[in-house]
Image: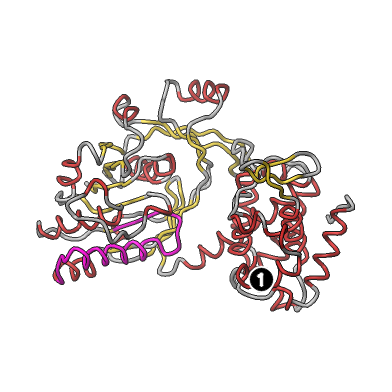
């Protein structure tokens, strides 16, 4: 038996990681046994107790040009424990010889170091602090190390987790023997995960439909898209514990996950971010609405084809294949992916997701990328039309107003600055974008066209 210690009980882990281990069990690779630990004080596990840790996942969307609603019953979870009210369980599990893997999803803020943490105050310290305590207990029990697979959405998640654990070893004076154990026996594998999970149905009609589809009431049912990808750094003996290939989700073990990160950020996230301002301006509400509009969907296709795909890697065909999967995901009628949700922190997102492709295109072609420039112009136009209403910031669009959430400096930027300031502000972009030949003039012409009510596509 391979036991997994899982920090986190949320929808994503249950719809992604736990379904994967259930699939391996069904395929005869197991048994895999998932033990969930609730890592934070809020919330409770009453639904897990009521259902004996069993639940269903419904994958809804498009697959191979067909609309599907596939139901999976998940039996891979044997325990769901409140880390605060039943801490003895995790202290017993960490000394189990069958325990091989630690998985976590404690949000991006969960992997953090706090120099005020006390080792004896296990309940109230950070997740890396808790992990340090447990690994130390395993070390003192003369047991081999573990493979640690964080899925938090931060760059080099396992490396950052390792750094925090190493700091706690120093902070708590746990000794060089334990540090050596942590360095040589515990294997920290960076990961990349990709599946959109909407969780429990939000409306009664969908809930009734899925309950009928499942065949019973399920308070833990979770909805996800058919696409799933888990890229894991191939270190230690992870290949003996994790099966690669397709097992409901696609598993890739690789020595270098940087390509997959770059591909996801540029193709999926980059096209998402670039389509939002223009689509909101055109009155759309969801990504699906965008993809059913001929002009906007063509804009998305052209952005990918001309401005993004050629600059991800030398293997254009591999990137095109992923882009085709992205388009299929955008066309999922069940996801209800709100444009206003994607619009959160749009400026920092555009910098992280689109500026890289923008500069690569410009460097190679000595001219501006057409479709990313159009998207950028609509982004600036959106922020130029923000006004404060009470404690909220509102954007005035042609068809409606929407709440906008971002750092205060960006929400109020155009009340104090102009387009030239924005493009040349190195504190935002790290470079002076007005140095790109023709960018400032093109953006100003596009903004004039938008304000005149004319279309750029």
Q: Residue at x 66, y 71 (%)?
A: 425
Residue 268 visible within the image: no
Q: Position of residue 394 (x, y in %)?
A: 69, 44
Quadrant into which the C terminus falls = bottom right
Q: In screen coordinates, is 248 left or right of 366? A: left
Q: Is 170 covered by the magenta stretch?
A: yes
> Foreground residue, 136 or 335?
136
Q: Residue at x 44, y 30 (%)?
A: 221
Q: In screen coordinates, is 123 left or right of 11? A: left
Q: In screen coordinates, is 439 left or right of 75? A: right
Q: Residue at x 14, y 55 (%)?
A: 137
Q: In screen coordinates, is 455 left or right of 293? A: right
> Foreground residue, 350 or 371?
350
Residue 216, relative to residue 244: is it above or below?
above
Q: Position of residue 436 (x, y in %)?
A: 74, 76
Q: Residue at x 24, y 45 (%)?
A: 123
Dot 1, crowdedness within 10 Å: few (<14), some or many (≥20)? some
Q: Position of residue 402 (x, y in %)?
A: 69, 41
**First to last magenta residue range:** 148-176
């Amino acid at each position: 038996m391979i036991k997994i210690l899982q920090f986190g009980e949320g929808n994503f882990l249950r719809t992604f990681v736990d379904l994967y281990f259930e699939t391996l069990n069904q395929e005869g690779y197991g048994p895999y046994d998932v033990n969930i630990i609730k890592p934070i004080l809020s919330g409770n596990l009453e639904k897990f107790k009521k259902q004996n840790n069993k639940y269903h996942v419904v994958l809804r969307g498009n697959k191979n040009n067909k609309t599907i609603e596939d139901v999976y019953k998940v039996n891979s979870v044997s325990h769901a424990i409140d880390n605060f009210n039943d801490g003895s369980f995790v202290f017993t599990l960490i000394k189990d010889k069958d325990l091989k893997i630690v998985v976590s999803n404690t949000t991006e803020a969960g992997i953090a170091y706090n120099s005020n943490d006390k080792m004896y105050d296990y309940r109230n310290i950070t997740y890396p602090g808790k992990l340090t305590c447990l690994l130390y207990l395993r070390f003192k029990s003369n047991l081999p190390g573990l493979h640690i697979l964080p899925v938090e959405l931060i760059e080099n998640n396992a490396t950052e987790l390792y750094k925090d654990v190493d700091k706690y070893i120093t902070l708590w004076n746990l000794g060089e023997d334990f540090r050596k154990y942590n360095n040589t026996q515990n294997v920290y594998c960076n990961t990349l995960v990709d599946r959109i999970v909407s969780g429990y149905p939000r409306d009664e009609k969908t809930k009734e439909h899925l309950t009928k589809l499942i065949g019973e009431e399920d308070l833990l049912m979770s909805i996800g898209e058919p696409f799933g990808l888990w890229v894991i750094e191939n270190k230690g003996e992870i290949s003996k514990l994790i099966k690669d290939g397709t097992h409901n989700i696609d598993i890739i073990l690789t020595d270098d996950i940087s390509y997959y990160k770059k591909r996801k950020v540029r193709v999926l996230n980059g096209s998402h971010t670039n389509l939002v301002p223009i689509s909101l301006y055109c009155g759309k509400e969801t990504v699906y609405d965008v993809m059913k509009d001929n002009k906007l969907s063509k804009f998305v296709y052209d952005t990918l084809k001309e401005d993004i795909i050629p600059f991800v890697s030398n293997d254009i065909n591999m990137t095109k294949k992923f882009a085709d999967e992205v388009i299929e995901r955008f066309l999922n009628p069940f996801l209800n992916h709100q444009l206003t949700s994607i619009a959160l922190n749009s400026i920092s997102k555009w910098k992280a997701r689109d500026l890289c492709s923008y500069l690569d295109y410009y460097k190679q072609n000595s001219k501006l990328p057409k479709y990313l420039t159009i998207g950028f112009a609509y982004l600036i136009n959106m922020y130029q039309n923000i006004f404060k209403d009470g404690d909220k910031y509102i954007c005035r669009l042609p068809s409606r107003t929407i709440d906008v959430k971002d750092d205060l400096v960006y929400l109020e930027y155009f009340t104090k600055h102009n387009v030239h300031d924005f493009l040349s502000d190195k504190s935002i972009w790290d470079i002076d974008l007005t140095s790109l030949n023709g960018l400032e003039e093109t953006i100003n012409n596009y903004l004039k066209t938008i304000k005149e009510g004319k279309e750029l596509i």
